[in-house]
Amino acid sequence: MMQRRRFNPKAGGLFAAIFIGVLALAAGCQADTAASSQAPADPIELGFMGSIPVYWGEAGDFGQLLSETGTPHWARRELETAYRLRPIDTLEEANLAGIDYLMLAQPRALSPEENVALDAWVRKGGKLLLFADPLLAAESSFALGDRRRPQGVALLSPILEHWGLDLQFDDSQEPGYRLVNAATAVIPVNLPGFFVRGAEESACVLSAGGLLADCPIEAGRAVVVADADLLDLHEPHPQAPAALLWLVDLSSR
């Protein structure tokens, strides 16, 4: 006659605990796998320099700058959806080292050393988006003459001429936003300039009525825009965010 084994409550509880633990471990592994498969890749680093306060926003004093209580720039939020911004102060070789993509937003006049470093960086494979506005109309909280105010006129003739570009301006145009068609995008502009080739050997391709210059420069590329008002902090055009992301993507190809 078969003897019935007596049930040990402690053993049953132990087996139940082990079984639940295994299920929890399996669920955790599946969750980790799903999370890792959905986790975004590390964002691409985008170097930034310019007089338009895209990174720091418009701060009235050093205290506001440190506390980040100044007026934030909408463009930083848009750019950081796809890129990790790296602000730099000067275009020295050391600052450009390790940067593959660079955006210059109406920068101050560059020193001769910076022009040389920027040209060498592009030729080695760097991808540049440069906003060079001959007459910036964007609003600012700071008065004319205040060093915190964005550069009103692009002073970049040396590097532009070196790449075979001549930035010109039609002073008969009326102020106010208008849209310029550029391939698959529309770009809002306000009193824009336009480019013409300044040298027969220039490899730059001009489009959108001269608003854009797409310049293959040895192993690198420079996309230059003859206007910067789509980066207006206070009164941005509704199409400005989409146009900005399109231009950054274009220059990074």
Image (spheres, rainbow, N blue to C red):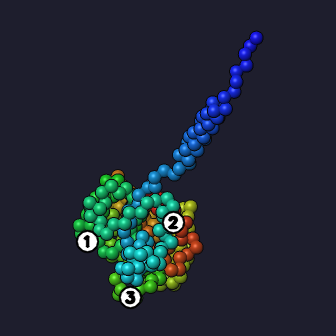
Mark 1 belongs to which amino acid? Answer: Ser
Q: Which mark is residue 78?
A: 2
At mark 1, the secondary structure is loop
- Residue on which disc 3 sits: 144
Which sits earlier in the primary sequence, circle 3 or circle 2?
Answer: 2
Q: Nearer the viewer, mark 1 or mark 2?
A: 2
Give the crowd class for mark 3: few <14, some 14-19, many >=20 residues within 10 Å: few
Mark 3 belongs to which amino acid? Answer: Leu
Instruction: Provide residue 177's location: percent of width, then percent of height.
Output: 54, 79
For the residues labelled 3 and 1, the Cα–Cα distance comes to 23 Å
- Residue on which disc 1 sits: 111
Quadrant of the rendering where the C terminus is positioned: bottom left
Q: Residue at x 24, y 69 (%)?
A: 112
Give the side of residue 168 with respect to residue 162, left or right. right
Q: Is residue 235 visible?
A: yes
Which sits earlier in the primary sequence, circle 3 or circle 1?
Answer: 1
Give the crowd class for mark 1: few <14, some 14-19, many >=20 residues within 10 Å: some
Give the side of residue 152 with respect to residue 75, left or right. left
